[in-house]
Image: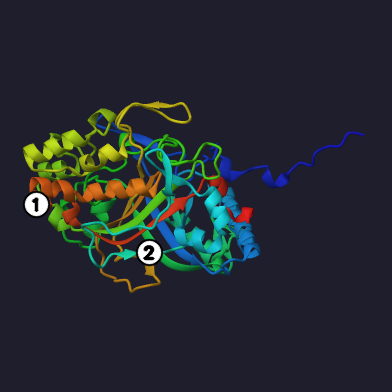
Amino acid sequence: MATETAFNWAEVVNYAKRISTAPPKTQYELPGVTLEDHLGVPVAVVPLWHAVVTARLTLTKGNAKSLKAAQERLSRALEQIEAIYPLNPGGIFIQVAYGLPYFRDYLPARVIDTYMPRALDNGKRGDRALIDAIKFPKDPATLILEHNDISFHFKSDFNEHISDVIRALFHPGTHFLNSIPVENVYVGDLFNMTSIRRGFAGRGMPRTIARRLRIPGADKIPAGAMLFMGFTSSHVHGLAQGKLPSFETIPGYTDQTPESYFAHGTIMHLSHIVIDLEGWYSLDHKDRLHRMFNPRRTEGPEHLSPPQAPETSTFKEQLEDDAKKTGILGHNAQMQFLSRVDKDTTTVYGEVIPKGTALFLRQDFDTVENPFEFNSDAPVSPTPVPGVHFIGFGPSAQLFEKIRKEMDGAELQAKFHLPDENTGFTKFLVTTHRQNYLEPPREHRSFPLAELI
């Protein structure tokens, strides 16, 4: 007699998959994000609301059994959340990344030595691709270099989705997600939360929120701007597309291959930066345009999204020529010879990308927190200040260090005797916190390597 497979009535209707979306192998790719045309320039319509939660683990160091149990619990919790909310801006995105303390304190050296990605130095395996964050030349003495074990980045078009998920994950008790009661989502006993950082990135929101809070300089933010500094940050051509930020994708950055444990993973940098909004908008449009992009730009005030296509890229010879001829270094131009490929390149997946293609990805968002909603290590102030939670992805922390040093522009500033106000826009920024993380592939987002100990 033939046996019949039992019909799974629990999955007759899967509401989270009403819009069919195959989860990407990476965590940082965002299915369902749509594009807008900004006067001929393609711009990604990123999720409106964001929150980052950082934490330290409560687990006993060196206890393999407890770490494996934690891996199973977090994996189960994330799967249950994603069975309720679709993986698109109308649902929720959750990205999990791990700081060096996690790898140093909770995993044996033999496992780390075998699997951790290493940066390449002139073709030879160098240091691990995840290294401690450092202070840069123009950082304030008060900058805090953080040492969290883990970071969660939540993003959605619906702020209540983020708040509900954070409560369900980190606070004990009965919880509802999308009005549905949930069990086995709480994992808060695994963590001591160190911060909650919230913000937004959406057309017109910076001006609206800043004016409501009476933040000085709010009236000068252009109507429709996505971020406090006015210009659009989510140009499609200004952000690495597909798997380009991953360890293995572009040859020459790390020792990883498509078969490696951390393939489809990346390095994530997290910073909080305060913006001098009044100082920035004391400059006229042309001066802001030149300091944001380069002094050769001519777009008028109606262009908040100047083109960022590969052919607009600035490389080192042109950057020095700008400094010599105009006495101005543009922020984007300062970094593009490192954040974009310097020749036509074929990825390990066979994709040919032209010179000037971005390989660095940003998912930053604005904030009015001072500095965070919650901070376990220092007080927070109720006085709102304009700022940005910067989140960037690339194949190695070494690459980010090089890019960030160029953003300060100390070498070219000294060479051409440039004042601070003509060297990008670092004069108008103050970084308060910084840390590097490793964001594993989606397959290993729950306590990577734990299953191997």
Relative to 422, say whether 303 is above or below. Answer: above
Residue 291 in percent (x, y) is at 15, 44
How far separated are the C-alphas under marks 2 and 1? 31 Å
Q: Is residue 7 visible?
A: yes
Residue 273: x, y in percent?
Answer: 27, 58
Please state if 75 lies on the left or on the right of 201 as rendered: right
Please tell me which of labels 2 and 1 falls first in the chain: 2
Q: Residues within 10 Å of mark 2 (few under 14, many from 20)?
A: some
Q: Is residue 438 left or right of residue 182?
A: left
Q: Is residue 305 left or right of residue 71?
A: left
Residue 244: quadrant of the picture: top left
Q: Secondary structure at mark 1?
A: loop
What amino acid does circle 1 point to?
A: Pro
Residue 153 placed where, x, y %?
A: 44, 54
Q: Secondary structure at mark 2?
A: loop
User: Which numbered disc covers residue 419?
Assistant: 1
